[in-house]
Amino acid sequence: MNEDTDVQRPKRRIQAFGRRAVLRGAAIGAAAPLLSATTTTSAAAANHGAPTAGSASFRWLGTSGWRIDIGGRTVLFDPYITRFKTGLFDGGLKPDTKLRSDHGLVREHVGSPEIVLVSHSHWDHVADVPHIAKSTGARIVGTETTFHLLVAFGVDPDQISVVKGGEVLDFDGITVQIVSSLHSRNKRHTYFAPGTLNAPPAAAPRTISDLPEGDTLAFQVTVGSGGPSAFLMGASDFSEQAVRGLSPDLAMVAVPSSAATFRYTSRLLHALDSPGVVVPVHWDNFEEPLSEPPRRDPVMDLSGFAAQVHRESPTSRIVVPDYRTTYGADMRAGTPTA
């Protein structure tokens, strides 16, 4: 999760964003609307190799999730599709909310994945992964806690690769670098449902409170020998030492819900060497369906975050994603998805 449960979310209609907004140039004030603009290749994009649009495509699955299609192959990151109600956005989280997965909806969005990367084991990142694993046979890559939870759900242990951070895995031309990372902090410098597992639970998890964080990972996925490379975050904190030197073409950066992490945006962007494209994620209400335009979580200051990115890394192009748009490897919009 990347939410601050200490903050009372207002019970009001949240303004929906348009199909796509690309931000570059002047900083955006916290109250200003997101602007659409035509952009040119920035100096940072040129330095990172200016990936060609046809080499891969990206679809945002909401929250921190992504579907990356490379030829006929698919990689998923934190695919949470079902997006069931927990009370989080309606006045109070209900920890006893039952886990569920809408199999038809999941099938509609994920295709036939070969690899599924899991950042951590909170429900808004892992709830649909057991069904995806069992129905597609995809290779799951995640922490030891993720391994034990999936085994309890009935996933074949041989299908799961346990990683800790520092590994570089070669999947026949798709390189996955595992990056040790950290979970988001709320204003009290704590976070939701900490804990790790060293063995499968006695019974399969039934509620959202049965899913501990279990440590957090980030991933860098690189297509072929020349890119593009995409840095994928599942929560808004990081290990500065672990990300330094990655220099991705694209950085899918989780928007923080508090200022608890010291100089989060500045430290991250400088450690990543000012990525050519920065894509804010985990700012949406992840209990609204993917069939609707994204609605901002009211505790997330998306415009303020975009302004920070521009200030700290003015050569980076900022792309605020939409659920229903397929993006090229340079994160320029292609044909909208159904």
Image (tube, helix red, strand yellow):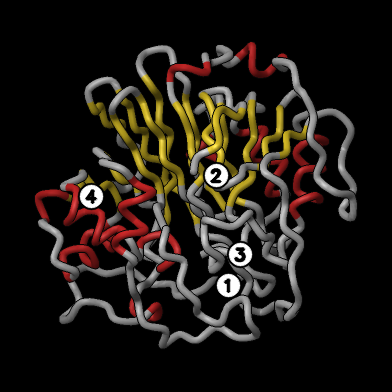
Give the numbered dot on residue 260.
Answer: none
Asked if the residue at tag 1 contacts the one at tag 2, i.e. Cβ–Cβ closer than 8 Å, the answer is no
Nearer to the camera, 260 or 93: 93
Give the numbered dot on residue 190.
Answer: 1
Residue at x 46% of width, y 49% of height: 65
19 in relation to 262, above or below: above
Cα separation, mark 3 vs mark 2, equals: 15 Å
Front tag of 4 and 2: 2
Front tag of 2 and 1: 2
Identify the mark nearer the N-term, 3 or 2. Answer: 3
Secondary structure of the residue carrying tag 1 is loop
Residue at x 17% of width, y 56% of height: 134
Front tag of 4 and 3: 3
Instruction: Name the kind of residue labelled 3 in the image.
Output: Asn
Instruction: Name the kind of residue labelled 1 in the image.
Output: Thr
Residue labelled with disc 2: 324
Density class for disc 1 (Cα within 10 Å; few <14, some 14-19, many ≥20) is few
Residue at x 34% of width, y 37% of height: 75
Secondary structure of the residue carrying tag 2 is loop
Residue at x 74% of width, y 67% of height: 14
Secondary structure of the residue carrying tag 3 is loop
Residue labelled with disc 4: 162
Identify the mark nearer the N-term, 4 or 1. Answer: 4
Front tag of 3 and 2: 2
